[in-house]
Image (cartoon, grey):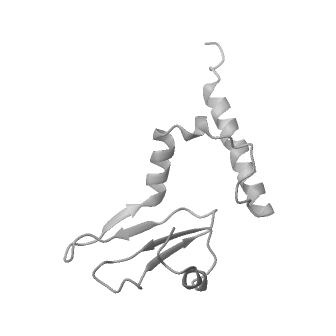
Amino acid sequence: MLAVPEVKARAKGYYDYLISVNRAARSRGLFELYLRGIRQRLPRINIPLATGDPDVKLDLQAVLEHTYEAGSYGDRLNYDTACNPPLSPADAAWARELIVKAKQQASNSSTPADGM
């Protein structure tokens, strides 16, 4: 859920993921928007701190990857089921390809080397 009106966000362009930052020191109606498609890396965003303090960079992709690994989501999620909401046919094919590659890598890394 975002505070930015969807019509304003959609006017900025296409996105699958939308990140918004609102600075308390400015008008509550002003937002910094970061739009991303599903195939794009999540951005590094500026997080405002107290007035006068410099922003802190937050690497959302790194946070997501760390959370995924620490939460063992790879073991708990069923990637063989369709996404909800569904992906476009092209993005669904792209995602299936990534899943097949990930399963192959997992299988290869769990197979003992020959002669051991």
- In the image, taking residue 7 as reference, residue 94 lies left or right, namely right
- In the image, taking residue 61 as reference, residue 40 lies left or right, namely right
Q: Residue furthest left?
A: 52
Q: Position of residue 113 (x, y in %)?
A: 63, 20
- In the image, taking residue 33 as reference, residue 37 lies left or right, namely right
Q: Is residue 43 above or below residue 113?
A: below
How many marks overall? 0
Q: Position of residue 112 (x, y in %)?
A: 62, 20
Q: Residue furthest right?
A: 89
Q: Is residue 98 above or below residue 108?
A: below
Q: Residue at x 66, y 30 (%)?
A: 108
- In the image, taking residue 97 as reference, residue 57 lies left or right, namely left
Q: Is residue 70 above or below residue 52?
A: above
Image quadrant in which you'd find residue 45: bottom left
Q: Position of residue 55 (x, y in %)?
A: 29, 71
Give the camera-side residue of 85 and 68.
85
Q: Residue at x 74, y 59 (%)?
A: 86
Q: Position of residue 20 (x, y in %)?
A: 46, 73
Q: Residue at x 51, y 45 (%)?
A: 68
Q: Is residue 30 above or below residue 93?
A: below
Quadrant showing the C terminus: top right
Image quadrant in which you'd find residue 102: top right
Q: Residue furthest top?
A: 116
